[in-house]
Image: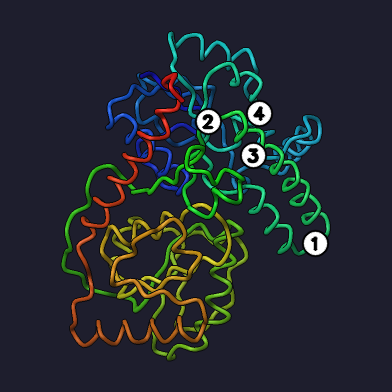
Amino acid sequence: MHFVFISSLVPVQAPASGYDIANRVIVDAIRLIGHKVSVIGFLQPGHQPAAPEDTRLLGRLEVTNARVTKLKKALWLKDAFLHGEPVSVAKMHAAAPSQIRAALDALGEIDGLILNSVQLPGAFLDIFRAWPCTFIAHNVEARSAADNAAGAGDPLTRFLFARDARILAKLERELCAASRHVFTLAEADRGELGVGRDEHSTTLPLVTSVTPPGGPVPRAPLYDAGMIGSWTWTANRAGLDWFIAEVVPRLPSDFRIGVAGGTGADVPVAPDNVTFLGRVDDAREFVRSCRVIPLISRTGTGVQLKTIETFEMGLPSVATRNALRGISRPPPNCVPADDPEAFASALVETVGRSRSGERLDSDGRAFHAHQLSGLSDALSRGLGCLDGKG
């Protein structure tokens, strides 16, 4: 069958963000089970399409707020109010409806559309309704916006996030209703989106690549614990702030912690045993330099790709309940802990075992194989709804 993947950002050759990784993996997995996939969407500057021959670009578009000017953000906000849309959806009007129609017409016979997240599908849903559709909900966008509103520090930001939350809730309902099948990345999101019935939705177990990871390799730790992320993103920053405020004070003063990734201008205040490294050349080499990986997500929906990557690499970890969303079978070297005291104790115990010479790494290939098998099965079931029988 021939499916068209409709996405704000197209899958790229070198995915870095969680969203990019998920996009690439889902499309690769659909091709792996034997379907043809064409892609329509924007390309973020600095990237190259993963499959140029199967990609119809709507243009190059920077969608990250932190990387654009204040004027561009103001124009996005103006468009959001003009169209009655969330800001993330309004950004998609960099393309005209005629461009969308022309891109679809150029692809020949189409068996169905895969509407990827709310942004581009939400901006042009009236066009996409003409085909059988499935919808991939990377997370529950309305709840994420509502959480951001609750944590906002000023009234204007709170108002804008609350506005987005209201409109996103309506838009997510419309996308679910327009789709023959809905894919989520976490089991809990099915119920929250109102598509909990098995015939209407499926959870997609994710991997970071359809290619299996390598086995365990010798490591020379530089840090006792380490984490990497985009800390300017509100949900990630909430986890980092919790970790520094609640967990770090319960750790020994000689417990070395490395934090990689951009924090923006607002670098958290932390004790001397916490080192902020900024962007690192090789994310995987950095996490391999840490005895244990704290998986510290406290809010948000969908799945944490950093959790999946940690498990594929076989690294020991301590994880909050929220960091484990979407994971049905965590590896045995992951310790779940939500309470700060329990989290700190688990870190200290794990590092102590590592310092004494005990090998705590596991073989992440077993986790990857289980996840990839589940992903292929789930996609086969859900996309079967587009073959005229659903």
Q: Secondary structure at mark 4?
A: helix
**Front tag of 4 and 2:** 2
Q: Choose top left, top right, bottom left or bottom right for residue 26.
A: top left
Amino acid marked by disc 2? Leu
The residue positioned 48% from the left and 68% from the top of the image is 321
Q: Earlier in the sequence, mark 3 or mark 4?
A: 4
The kind of residue on which mark 3 rests is: Glu
Front-lying residue, 44 or 35: 35
Along the viewing direction, whichever of 250 and 345 lies nearer the viewer: 345
Return the residue at label 1: 154
Residue under label 4:
123
Of labels 3 and 1, the one closer to you: 3
Looking at the image, which is closer to me, 327 or 51?
Answer: 327
Find the distance from the CA under tag 4 to the CA under tag 1: 28 Å
What residue does disc 2 label?
115
Disc 4 crowd, CA 10 A, few/some/many (<14, 14-19, 20+)? many
Q: Which mark is residue 241?
A: none
Say which amino acid is labelled 4. Answer: Ala
Whether residues under marks 3 and 1 lie with C-beta atoms below 8 angstroms apart, the answer is no
Mark in front: 3 vs 4: 3
Q: Secondary structure at mark 1?
A: loop
Q: Which mark is residue 172?
A: 3
Q: Are marks 2 and 1 in contact (CB under 8 Å)?
A: no
Compared to residue 269, the image places residue 176 above or below, namely: above
